[in-house]
Amino acid sequence: MRKISIAFLMAVALTGCAKRTPLESSARLTVVQDSQALPPPNRNDLTAADRPALIGPLDTIEVTVFSVPDLNREMQVDSSGRIAMPLAGTIDARGKTAEELALAIEAALRARYVRNPEVTVNIKSSVSQVVTIDGQVVEPGLYPVTNQMTLMRVIASAKGLSEFARQDDVVILRTVDNRRMAGLYNVAAIREGAYDDPLVFANDVIVVGDSPQRRLFRDFVSVSPLLAAPLIAILQ
């Protein structure tokens, strides 16, 4: 009976191991394997000419008020996307362009009886230079791109792989010379030094795959830990 239970558990656990359709090159996508180098983006790839630069939380901006020089200052947008200035008070900067924020500051100053305020706003530094990580990591989201950012560092920023992550199914999506490209990576192989930790650039999208067999095994353990115990021993 014990052998039957073990065989049954092994068969069910391995049903999730079937290979999924691999990501392949197409007219819209070029796929490179992890042993090859995903080329870096060029300057044009890192900018979006059709998209205005929007101010967001933790961006650093420079505000110049020509009629009131004492109000000129460099400041950081707070984590909620707001700034605070003398006379103008608290203003929501999140999602505004520099020009839109300048107009909002002018309106706030005008309401405080500052005559004909002329304001300019410059974005000094922006955390909009970000990489997106999605899928099976602990904290998916947007993360700032720092100098020499790599795949493993981005995963670490996202608090590491989740319980159901598939280490051999990690994809980096990137635009190079206006062409969409995908690099396929194996995190376990990188950790073992099989090849270098690949560089990551602004606007990259990283997707960590899901491991169905891990989910099935977790479900069996939660439903019947006594039946799962022999399988744990075998897998170890």
Image (cartoon, rainbow, N blue to C red):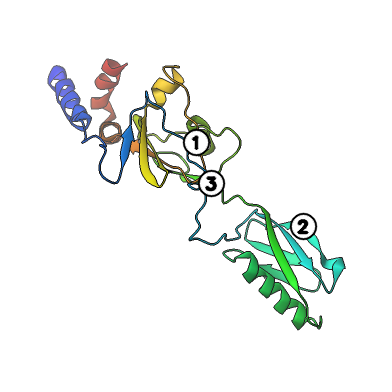
The 10 Å Cα crowd at callout 1, few under 14, some 14 to 19, many 20 or more, is many
Do the residues under discs 3 and 2 have CB atoms within 8 angstroms? Answer: no
In the shown orientation, is residue 117 left or right of residue 6?
right
In the shown orientation, is residue 93 left or right of residue 86?
left
| Residues at marks 1 and 3, CA–CA distance in whole angstroms | 10 Å
Q: Relative to 58, is 70 above or below?
A: below
Residue drawn where x is 70% and y is 64% of the image: 121
Label 3: which residue? 130
Under mark 1, the amino acid is Val
On the image, the x and y values in percent for residue 208 come to 38, 37
Residue drawn where x is 15% and y is 21% of the image: 7
Label 2: which residue? 74
Mark with earlier residue (3, 2): 2
> Where, by quadrant of the figure, is residue 157 drawn?
top right
Label 1: which residue? 200
In the rendered view of the protein, which quadrant contains the C terminus? top left
Under mark 2, the amino acid is Glu
Q: Relative to 142, is 168 above or below?
A: above
Under mark 3, the amino acid is Val
Secondary element at tag 1: loop
On the image, the x and y values in percent for residue 50 come to 48, 61
Mark with earlier residue (1, 3): 3
| Residues at marks 1 and 2, CA–CA distance in whole angstroms | 30 Å
Secondary element at tag 2: strand
On the image, the x and y values in percent for residue 91 come to 68, 69
